Amino acid sequence: MWEFPFNNLDPAGSAGAALLCGVLSERLSSRQAELCSETLCWVFLPVVFRLAGRSTGDSGLKATLPSNSRSHAPSPVSLWIVAIGIVMHSVFKAENGMVAFLPALAPILLVAQRYLGSEGSSSANTDSSLFSLLVNTVWGTALTALLSFATLTAGDIGEYALSAIPTVALLMVYVVLTPKTRKAPRWLPSFEVEKEVLPLSLRVLVLLCIALSVETYLFEFPRGGLLSALTLGLSKALTWYFLVHTARSSSWRTAAATGIFSLLSTCNPFALSSDVQAVSYVVASFLTLGQVIHLLPHQANKSILWAFLLLSLIPFVANTLTIRSARSAIIPSHAHPIETLVQKANTEFQDLIDRQSKTSRAAHTEYRRRYGVDPPPGFDAWYEFAQSHQSPIIDDFDTLYARVSPFWRLTGLEVQEAMRSVESASSNELWLCTFSNREAKTRCRNSHRANDRHIAFSFDKLLAVLPGVLPDITFLVNHLDEPRVLLPPGQKTRSNMENLSRRPVWETLTKYCSQKISGGHEYTVGTYGLPFVTNISSAMDLCHHPEYSSMHGFAISPTSFRLIEGTVPILSTGSPSTMGDILFPSPAYLESEFEYVDAHDIDWDKKQNNLYWAGSTTGGFALDDQWHHFHRQRFVHLTQNLGQQQHHYIRNEDGVIRRIQSSFLNSRLYNVAFSRILHCERKHCRDERVHFHFKSWADRNRPLQSRLVFDLDGNGISGRYYKLLASKSLPLKQTLFKEWHDDRLIPWVHYIPVSQSLAELPEMVLYLTSTESGQKRAKEIAEHGREWFSKAFREVDRTVYVYRLILELARLQDPERPALL
Ligand SMILES: *[C@@H]1O[C@H](CO)[C@@H](O)[C@H](O)[C@H]1NC(C)=O
Ligand SMILES: *[C@@H]1O[C@H](CO)[C@@H](O)[C@H](O)[C@H]1NC(C)=O
């Protein structure tokens, strides 16, 4: 007759088997497979017990059953309590992932079992070793639990607070399954799994079916593969079987400790952002494994279980060695593209500063030279103002001119007509603002809205110093984060407004590109095939980059996008290369939330040597699985090391410097997380919550604690950029949106530009954090940016810009102005 192979295991053997199956279950576990595999587990479990029982003629556990085991039938209540506990735990894992509170089970179970009089009934290891303290004293178990808990949560208790619920559920399960002694209170239900496995299993299955139906109703039927659910289900069933086996000869605390060890030992050190955390995973696994071993009865062969520590140690050592070797393989600085790019950019920046006009006449001439027309009326007074406030930029307003000049096709009267027509459209999401010269005050109105997001306030703040200088003028300001205007070729005054929220808009954005696929414009610096940004205007040009259509939330599914197709001057804070919004400094830059305060910053040498970012999932509205391609999600996915992605590095191989591929990313160099989920439908919010590691909370000054800080688009421009520029940290910036400051902010001099693909980011961060020359460069650029910010981004510098902008707008609307073809 066939014999169930595991019947004659001694306690150490069954504990080993439980550890093995527990770790395997944890490895295989996935949210999609959780409920289905749990269902299969409880289908398998009675079969496993039956097989085990039949092959020994009776119960498979007979050999280890204590002789005084209970004979009365369990109350239905106790069966339901256990079933509910098991299902709650499983549902939580399916919806929220890790049960980080699990370590708290050890001390609570110890206290509970002492109170119930069942503790130490069988194991009774009372030697005075370290593990005796960690197993048999409340403070010892509590200390281990605290360490494990801190390790699993990385200190973010808020994010994992809810996992207290499944922990309490499991506690109930273990308490009910603990054999009842005479000392225990009479009301306490209790029973033995091995005797009641079938009725228990039926109850669990009923509850799981309900849970699965609810999940299917709210989201959809979990789409895990059948095979993975089967494997996981079997592995869970065997874990239960061996845990029951082990618990008989020791205590259910072994089961709790085994669960915690499985959780700790399966953590991937390659995804951790700090060394301390990596070490504490190993230490916590060691202590928890020690608890398991110590709880087992005295036996010669139980020390072999220490071999399980290798499950933590091997990945840890492998991770440490890989990090070392990656650091030592960085190519020498003189050959690194970053050095070349920085040097080149510095020269260009110096030229830019040196060539600014020194007199009013020279500025006038330069304007004519650049744009082929005279500057607008009032230009000389503007020059005097700019000069008297030491504006370091006098001539370079090309971005402003590029956005204003298309309207020259219309006469001044036609421009006014176009503005009136778009203003009369319902729910236009535009503010009609009137600047009155006498009071230097701006008033903005919108028929549907009351809060203008500080638009009027920001114009008042910037223009208060200029009473009696500017013309009275009316202009339209965009209320939304997203840009608004697509300029059709030709001179149409009629415009079309269309709600394009939550739809792919790439085709619309690029429909007036003359030649879509190009890329020959970028000058070549040896970047070894990594997409370091060598020409920022080309990198931001949508017409040259058809691949951006599936790389940015704005292109895939903008959150709120009301496109105006027509020749209407509208002010926006940011807009991509193919659109026609006129740019003005974002009012967000004046908000206290985004203000840089010196006292919150620290010196470079005290900053953590890593890249920091935290924020919400803005940038696109998640209607389907496309959120994987949104810019913020791609960035967090990459830097949290979530996929089996291949990265590129520049290496010296046999004397040849070239690009290599590797799946390695040094996660210690990144502290990146989402802190809020927004802009998604229920199902996809849930998917995102499970896909990424979250922070429950992020201090808005926390970026300043790191040397490198990332900044990228949300739905529109990122309001925190100036805070980062002004700080002693180095901003790494990725954006598709042009802003008013683009002419005066020079990549590789004041900040580091990052491509949309992010493919150069791993090499970039490695170089800037892990070599002496890279660190020196990073510090230098951080200082340059900070210094330049204090010279060229003062409030008065924005006044200088808006002053010139208003002169240009006034000329556009001048009813006397003819069209210029
Ligand atoms: C625009 O479309 C989106 C999605 O289709 C919708 O949710 C939103 O309410 C619409 N906005 C307006 C103003 O109609
Ligand atoms: C950068 O690219 C643009 C095209 O987008 C091109 O006109 C310009 O000449 C390039 N700049 C340099 C320095 O090559």
Image (spheres, rainbow, N blue to C red):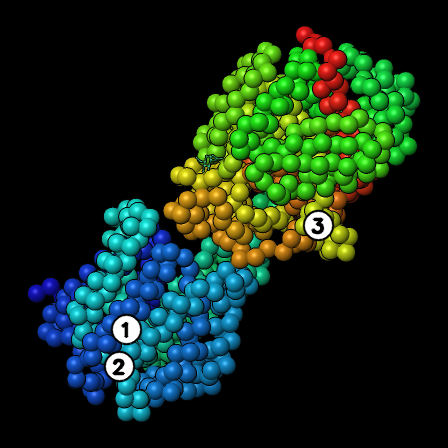
Q: Quadrant of the C terminus?
A: top right
Q: Nearer the viewer, mark 3 or mark 1?
A: 3
**Amino acid bearing label 3:** Ser
Is residue 801 visible to the viewer in this orientation of the structure? no
Which of the two residues, 803 or 785, is positioned nearer the viewer here? Answer: 803
Which comes before the other along the chain, label 3 or label 1? 1
Can you tell which mark lies on residue 592? 3
**SS for dot 3:** helix
| Percent of width and height locating residue 458 | 73, 40
What residue occupies the far top of the structure in this picture?
821
Check disc 2: other Cα within 10 Å, few if <14, some if 14-19, many if 20+: many
Instruction: Choose the circle earlier in sequence order: 2 or 1.
Output: 1
Query: Which residue is pictured at 59% across the width and 22% down the height?
Result: 421
The residue singled out by tag 2 in the image is 189
Left or right placement of residue 601 versus residue 64 in this view: right
Quadrant position of residue 720: top right
Residue 275 in the image, given as x and y percentages of width and height: 58, 58
10 Å neighbourhood of mark 1: few (<14), some, or many (≥20)?
Answer: some
Q: Is 806 positioned to the left or the right of 53 in the image?
A: right
Residue that lies at the very extreme toward the bottom in this rendered image:
183
Element assignment for label 1: helix
Badges 2 and 1: C-beta atoms under 8 Å apart? yes
| Residue 747 versus residue 177 in the image, above or below | above
Give the distance between the C-alpha atoms of the residues marked 3 and 1, in whole angstroms.
52 Å
Q: x and y percent of residue 189 in the render?
A: 26, 81
Q: Amino acid at mark 2?
A: Pro
Question: Could you tell me residue 359's position as x and y percent?
Answer: 91, 22
Above or below residue 180? Residue 398 is above
Residue that extends furthest to the left in the rendered view of this protein: 1
Q: Residue at x 28, y 92 (%)?
A: 182
Residue at 81% across / 17% down in the picture? 375
Tell us which disc is closer to us: 2 or 3. 3
